[in-house]
Amino acid sequence: MQRFAGVILVDRRGWVLLQERDEHPAIDPEKWSLCGGHLEPGEEYHVGALRELEEETGIRMDLHELELWTEIEIVHEAYGSVDTMQVFVGATALTDDDVVLGEGRQIVFVEPAVVPTLDLSPTALRIVPAFLESDHYRRLTR
């Protein structure tokens, strides 16, 4: 079993930060997903979430700016494993211009109404719509 951390940032418009993966990753190539990834051995989830966010976007945040939203088990057919993922969420004043693409095809803030039209990864398909319907999302957009 591997451990993963993901991050969803919500901008001032209520749009969510998502990554369009390119053709290279073993997991979910050419799908839309969360920023995040594998944890290093012994790494705590929140530390890995912050590290992955910075590696993929150039965005550096502090732990107090994110909160744990959920923990789920995910099936990774590419690895033949059932893994654990924690998803952290937070509000931000950042815009697409603040994102430095470190991985994937693009990482942008996406309007919630557009999310159902995207080719989401299986994990993102479970997480993003549920988050957009959650009290956490409503609280972050106030």
Image: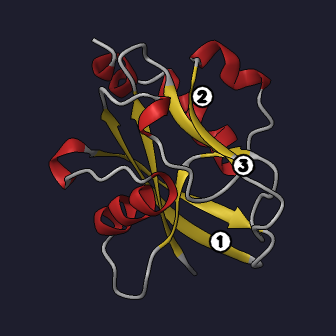
Q: How many angstroms separate mark 3 from mark 1 (CA)? A: 26 Å
Q: Which disc number belongs to residue 63? A: none
Residue 66, position in %: x, y? 26, 45
Q: Amino acid at mark 3?
A: Arg
Q: How is the image coloured?
A: secondary structure
N-terminal label among 3 and 1: 1
What residue sits right under mark 1 in the picture? 82
Tell me the element at label 3: loop
What residue sits right under mark 2 in the picture? 129
Q: Amino acid at mark 2?
A: Pro
Q: Residue at x 34, y 27 (%)?
A: 136
Q: Residue furthest left?
A: 64
Say which quarter of the image contains residue 1. bottom right
What residue sits right under mark 3 in the picture? 105
Residue situated in front as seen by the camera: 131 or 15: 15
Tell me the element at label 1: strand
Q: Residue at x 35, y 17 (%)?
A: 12
Residue situated in front as seen by the camera: 82 or 128: 128
Q: Is residue 81 left or right of residue 86?
A: right
Q: Residue at x 70, y 64 (%)?
A: 75
Residue 55, position in %: x, y? 46, 63
